[in-house]
Image (tube, rainbow, N blue to C red):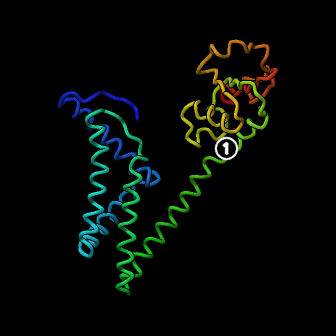
Amino acid sequence: MAQSSTSKNLSDAITNLALIKTFALEAVMMVSYSNTIVAWAHGIIFAVVLFISARLRPWFTIYIITGLSIGVGLLCLQMLLNGVSVPPRAVTFAWVLYSILCVSVALKGFERGGLYAKLPWNLMLILNLVYSIWAFENYQKYTTWQSETKQLAIKAGSQNGMIFVFGKYTMIPGADTAGIQESRGLKLRLKYLTGRDVIICDKTPEACEEITIDNRTESAAQSISVQQLSDNTIIQLPIAAK
């Protein structure tokens, strides 16, 4: 959680309301794959199944709503009082409770038979199919990045020395599509694949002073190269568009 202003008075609390709005939008977009139509569809489905469940199983519905209210309420209170931003994954529990509510209504419909049995199950199957397709498409966004960084790791090897990375991580194919927003993403990826310590020279140039220009290839500015220098490895990324 990233620290923001601490709410000491009413004006701070009002300011922190913006964090709640941002958190709510990010959470909704996360579970809807950033699709506004799907977000509205989930809202409508939730309202419908909540109404049906309240009529068929009122105490069960109260249990679900109480869990949602307490969980989301505590998160919002944390943001309001302390001014901290909460990641969207914090509401995973709400997604689970929503799913339980949908399945519960579907089971009740199945018990009644006829249209009540077919409609909920068909709707759930359609949603599962849509999410399976989106999950596959979303996975494809990362394949180029994973492949390119794996090749870098193979060339770097697994010896004991450091890996020094020069250039812009954004010039690695697939970095933009995969949503890599910081050089830390490349650092952690290489460390995971090689088990070696990685230095991003753009971030900590003082740690790379021992690596002189003479140690790096002349073509480094336009292409990706991997060089072994004693126990260390130099990865030179392009510094401008090819």
Q: Residues within 10 Å of mark 1 (few under 14, many from 20)?
A: some
Q: Quadrant of the N terminus?
A: top left
Q: Quadrant of the C terminus?
A: top right
Rendered location of residue 26, percent (x, y): 39, 45
Q: Residue at x 78, y 30 (%)?
A: 159
Q: Residue at x 38, y 86 (%)?
A: 113
Q: Is label 1 in a helix, a strand or a loop? A: helix
Given residues 15 and 210, the one toward you in this image is: 210
Given residues 60 and 126, the one toward you in this image is: 60
Given residues 36 and 31, the one toward you in this image is: 31
Rendered location of residue 201, percent (x, y): 64, 20
Rendered location of residue 215, percent (x, y): 79, 16
Given residues 74 and 79, the one toward you in this image is: 74
The vertical placement of 116 against 77, above or below, is: below
Q: Is residue 230 left or right of residue 40?
A: right
Q: Residue at x 74, y 29 (%)?
A: 223
User: Which image quadrant for residue 213?
Assistant: top right
Dot 1 amino acid type: Gln
